[in-house]
């Protein structure tokens, strides 16, 4: 393919993308193909001779499209959103054009420096404390800074490694040798709640430490008292606490942990304190939500997925640290085949030492496009629109009388269930098993028509329905539809019990 052919094909692809987004409402959001469907219709080997773009484009429509679940649909409510926007796509196109491997400043100075700039922009936009900024107000270097990770799950691993490095250095300062510390690594403990994303426990498995899952109460929040009790028990058993994660907006209910209390414990016990705000962190662009995040200014690190709710295509997860030295100490390794070392400063970072892989894409470009083409006001309007829609849906469900809200509606998530009084056929109480079955059936019935997609979860053994509002293209008409489908499906489920 030469440049002339690329122009022709590229224009066709842009048209196809625009057509796709314009017609999403006419496509069922959830794929219904059977496992191995694609294996059965594609050749068993790659083609020997070149095939035309037109043939491949036809296969996109006839073979790939049926197997796609359409996350960008306004009728997709199943999981937290995976953002998309035309400005972000344009930024990704430029990133693909340059196609750099930006592990060090010298690999492409613009790539490194733009990331530093936009991460400071974004940190300020969500109200982060100045200690997280790469560049201070007076233009001098800070000790902290931001870096784009692939996902919040990657950020977990990175900061846990940094936290372990901090703990190792502390033990060495107490007079222990390197060998002594290495023999103690299996005793290191990281703390999460039973509502923390599974990425936390997976990260502990990867780095080889103990994951202590701390029970939450009825409000599903990790509290200072529960954390203190778990740490005390582990210290008595001879273990070494080193890391804690508090969550700003859990996956199940968007509960907010006791971040100030967690910070108190982390400071007294010398733990690395990470705040995972993968979904809800985007809401902090709106000042009215920032009081809910009190305590993040005391954390060692903070992360949210810009690609979840802030108009930026996957993957773009924003991680900030208050002091980068532990990251760099733990992850910096040099080899002679790498470019000559440029001393890492706030103005010329070697971001390879802030992440797991060596290579990295020019992801800052799409974030730069989004922040410039929407502006802070446009991003705030995007978030507030979805919060209003979620609040409206909550009000309508309560007004119906058959539903109960299972968790406060704070952001764009509505968690509810059919209540027992709606299911009961007489004055007798309905057992939990029957209520759970009714709500499981409700989700299945809502999804059966193919008009939308939603999902269920369990809260301490209670089945609840989750409606995650946040698609870039979700409008009030889509929320109207989900309400109508829920009501229709509830009527059928209750009648069939």
Image (cartoon, rainbow, N blue to C red):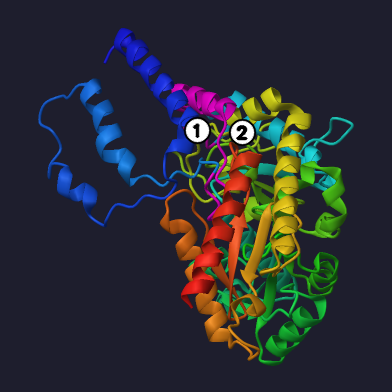
Q: Which residues are magenta?
A: 75-103
- In the picture, the disc for residue 342 is 2
Q: Is residue 96 positioned above or below 379 on the image?
A: above
Examine the image and state in which quarter residue 44 appears: top left
Report the side of 424 relative to 266 (left or right).
left
Residue 78 covered by magenta stretch: yes
Q: Position of residue 406 (x, y in %)?
A: 69, 70
Label 2: which secondary element: loop
Disc on res. 135:
none
Q: In the image, is residue 263 above or below residue 149? A: below
Considering depth in this image, is 287 or 453 the residue closer to the camera?
Answer: 453
Quarter residue 99 falls in: top left
Compare residues 251 and 145 and report the one nearer the observer.
251
At a point 64% along the width and 80% down the height, the residue shown is: 420
Residue 470 at least partly seen: no
Q: Nearer the viewer, residue 216 or 229?
A: 216
Q: From the top left corner, tell me how far across and down residue 132 is, in percent.
A: 78, 46
């Amino acid at each position: 393919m030469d440049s002339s052919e690329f122009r022709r094909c590229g224009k066709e692809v842009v048209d196809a993308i625009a057509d796709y987004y314009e017609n999403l409402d006419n496509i069922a959001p959830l794929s219904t193909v059977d496992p191995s469907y694609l294996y059965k219709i594609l050749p068993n080997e790659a083609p020997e001779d070149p095939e035309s773009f037109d043939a491949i484009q036809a296969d996109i429509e006839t073979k790939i499209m049926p197997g796609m679940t359409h996350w960008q649909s306004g009728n997709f409510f199943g999981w937290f959103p995976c953002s998309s926007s035309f400005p972000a796509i344009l930024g990704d196109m430029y990133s693909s054009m340059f196609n750099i491997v930006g592990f060090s400043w010298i690999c492409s100075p613009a790539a490194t420096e733009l990331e530093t700039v936009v991460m400071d922009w974004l940190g300020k936009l969500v109200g982060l404390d100045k200690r997280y900024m790469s560049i201070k107000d007076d233009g001098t270097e800070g000790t902290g800074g931001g870096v784009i990770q692939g996902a919040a799950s990657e950020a977990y691993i990175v900061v846990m490694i940094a936290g372990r490095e901090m703990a190792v250095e502390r033990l060495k300062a107490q007079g222990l040798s390197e060998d002594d510390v290495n023999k103690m690594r299996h005793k290191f403990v990281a703390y999460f709640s039973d509502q923390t994303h599974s990425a936390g426990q997976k990260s502990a498995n990867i780095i080889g430490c103990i994951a202590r899952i701390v029970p939450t109460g009825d409000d599903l929040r990790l509290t200072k008292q529960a954390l203190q009790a778990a740490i005390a028990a582990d210290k008595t058993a001879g273990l070494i606490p080193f890391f804690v994660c508090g969550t700003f907006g859990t996956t199940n209910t968007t509960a907010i942990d006791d971040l100030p209390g967690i910070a108190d414990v982390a400071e007294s016990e010398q733990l690395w304190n990470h705040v995972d705000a993968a979904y809800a962190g985007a809401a902090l662009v709106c000042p009215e939500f920032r009081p809910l995040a009190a305590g993040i200014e005391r954390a060692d690190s903070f992360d949210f997925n810009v690609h979840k709710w802030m108009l930026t295509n996957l993957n773009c997860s924003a991680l900030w640290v208050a002091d980068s030295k532990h990251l760099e100490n733990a992850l910096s390794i040099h080899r002679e085949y790498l470019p000559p070392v440029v001393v890492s400063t706030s103005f010329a970072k070697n971001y390879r030492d802030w992440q797991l892989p060596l290579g990295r894409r020019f992801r800052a470009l799409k974030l730069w496009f989004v922040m410039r083409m929407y502006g802070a006001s446009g991003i705030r309007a995007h978030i507030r629109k979805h919060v209003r829609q979620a609040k409206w849906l909550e009000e309508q469900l309560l007004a119906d009388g058959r539903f109960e809200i299972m968790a406060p509606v704070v952001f764009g998530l509505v968690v509810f269930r059919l209540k027992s009084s709606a299911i009961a056929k007489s004055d007798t109480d309905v057992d939990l098993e029957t209520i759970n079955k009714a709500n499981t059936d409700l989700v299945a019935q809502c999804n059966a028509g193919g008009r939308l997609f939603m999902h269920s979860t369990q809260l301490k053994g209670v089945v609840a329905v989750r409606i995650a509002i946040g698609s870039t293209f979700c409008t009030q008409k889509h929320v109207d539809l989900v309400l109508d489908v829920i009501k229709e499906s509830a009527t059928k489920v209750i009648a069939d019990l």
